[in-house]
Image: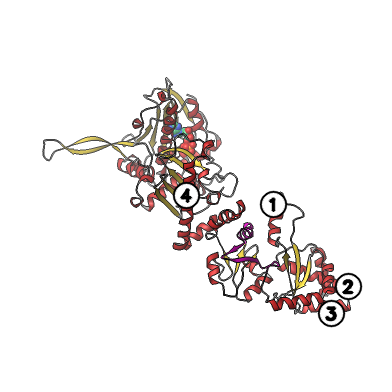
Amino acid sequence: MEKRQFQTESKKLLDMMINSIYTHKEIFLRELISNASDAIDKRYFRSLTEPETGLNRDEYEISISADEPSRKLVISDNGCGMTREELENNLGTIAKSGSLDFKSENAAENVDIIGQFGVGFYSAFMVAGKVTVVSKVYGAEKAWKWESEGVDGYTLDECDKDGVGTEITLYIKPDSEEEDYCEFLEPYSIQRLVKKYSDYIHYPIRMDFEVNKPVEGKEGETEKVIERRTLNSITPLWKKPAAEISEEEYNNFYTSKFMDYEPPVKVMHYKQEGTVEYTAMLFIPSHAPFDYYSKSFEKGLQLYSSGVMIMDKCAEILPDYFSFVKGLIDSSDISLNISRETLQQDHQLRTIAKAVEKKIKSELAKLMETDREKYEKFFRAFGSQLKFGVYSDYGTHKELLQDLIMFMSSNDMKYTTLKEYVSRMPEEQKSIYYACGETPEKAMRLPQAEAVKAKGYELLLLTEDVDEFTLQTLMSYEDKKFVNVASDALDLASEEETKKLKDENESAKELLDFVKESAGGLHDVKYSATLGKHPAAISSEGGMTIEMARVLSKMPDADSQLSASLVLELNGEHPAVQKIKELFSSDRDRCAKYCKILANCARVSSGLEIENPEEFGELVGELMV
Ligand code: ADP
């Protein structure tokens, strides 16, 4: 008999399974049962259009039998089965599922991979030394038998089988000092595992139990009889009343169905009654999937029509800003044969989508109030998406999202909401101030930020690209406008001070023009009253702030003309500025050099780059000797 080889990747995975140190070996059963259930789904779907290929709905089942003496565990289904080619392609290679983008060959590091992806059929080799798969498809005369003892390869032979479907036999490994495998042959532990992992599988999972029964008519006597039991509750978990579901059940359901290794931060399970009736079971993950912020991520909820899944990822039902939500909607009001094309016009679905959006929002708001720590964990993972949601679609959703977003506060370097910020504002504070920087600490060190702090005002510290665009879209919160401290919108000075400054600027016009000319690259130079200990700082004039120009110029299709109108603000009281004033009348050459140095220092303290570092280095060197 010819032995076939596994594909390289399959071999690696197989090897990993065989030598697995993974403590949850028991998940192999869940994997095989899910495969069986999928196979029945496939046969059922096909029979909707070709009735002769299927069975009556109540005839479908997954059957388990265990025999301790021969150490055989058999899992069979009457699903679609596999042809010879399918056996070869599906079990000889691991092409699909993307499960296998794993890099490391180190078993210890692979533990997480098993947990994260669910590795399907090969997990059988964690508990079995040999696996036999006998499968038959509708219309075929013969069945095919696939058999493997692990990495050495597998064999494929024709054989006989009653009925369409697949029968998988696991030859359970012998017990050893380190590991007991016999629980996988013990009916009550199998029952426990099915309950734990596969309770919501919507086909009956059945197994025979040997039980002692009283003999009828003979008091006190019992006899052994075989009783066939259904191990799972079949009713989908979401159809059970929420009060009857434990946290562990929700978590198991979530982690196995949505391939996550961490329980969600929030579960929303509710039944909506009214014009459109549906049950929703939604989860907010506690961390972003590895591909969340990439193009390959697909959002969507599963769509069920009366317990039958009709779509895996229905994107229409979930707005982009809540794309991290996982879960399902089950409604008898959605027709079974809804297609992608008709989805958008579907009135029922639109109604559901609206209600789901409202629900997610209110639950997030509730989470923020009741469990701040969890909310912050959530926000660290998905906050950018919410902020992006405020900004996108021309701010259409800003009302919905503005109370869910948070920024770092200069008060305690912790997250604050806009509402909290405003509630702390002293009466005379006119605006909500923010500073931008690579990190909250850097933002706080901006010269202008220090001035705002010195006034006793709080600042929002913006560190993400989307942040300022979010605030600009909001424009104001509770009638307080947002002000970038490094811009001409900064309004700290009193009317009197402003007037005084204006006069000063006018009378020093000649000097200020000279500074502008000498420093280069500036839109304007003026005195400012809000620089504290700093001699100078850079701010922007007009709508384009320094931060916005920085973000926009990074875009792939950025306009090279994109830049902020930079203003050099001078602290007239500072000795360095006074020195410039002095040199302006005594030594213009030297004065010009000082202007350059000062402007560059201001750029650095405002988070900008020096345009000509070489020249700057020379100038400073000259100054030092
Ligand atoms: P996955 O389920 O992630 O695709 P598996 O390794 O579990 O990966 O299974 C590979 C493929 O083998 C499945 O996609 C399916 O096409 C096929 N398969 C597995 N078990 C069965 C079964 N009981 N009946 C029919 N096909 C099956």
The segment highlighted magenta reads 463-490
Tell me how many marks there are: 4
The answer to which of 476 and 581 lies nearer the viewer is: 476
Q: Going from the N terminus, do you reach mark 1 or mark 2 first? A: 1
Q: Mark 3 = which residue?
A: 582
Q: Mark 2 = which residue?
A: 589
Q: Is residue 305 above or below residue 577?
A: above
- The magenta stretch spans residue 251: no
Q: Going from the N terminus, do you reach mark 3 or mark 2 first? A: 3
What amino acid type is highlighted by mark number 2? Answer: Asp
SS of the residue under disc 1: loop
| Circle nearer the viewer, 3 or 4 | 4
Tell me if residue 490 can be seen: yes
| Circle nearer the viewer, 4 or 2 | 4
Q: Quadrant of the C terminus?
A: bottom right
Q: CA distance from mark 1 to mark 2?
A: 40 Å
Tell me residue 25's x, y (percent).
Answer: 41, 44
| Circle nearer the viewer, 3 or 2 | 3
Q: Mark 4 = which residue?
A: 356
- Coloring scheme used: secondary structure
SS of the residue under disc 2: helix
Label 3 crowding class (10 Å Cα cut-off): few <14, some 14-19, many 20+? few
Mark identifier at residue 555: 1
What amino acid type is highlighted by mark number 3? Answer: Glu
The answer to which of 290 and 571 lies nearer the viewer is: 571
Q: Is residue 23 above or below residue 46?
A: below
Label 4 crowding class (10 Å Cα cut-off): few <14, some 14-19, many 20+? some
Q: Is residue 242 left or right of residue 380?
A: left
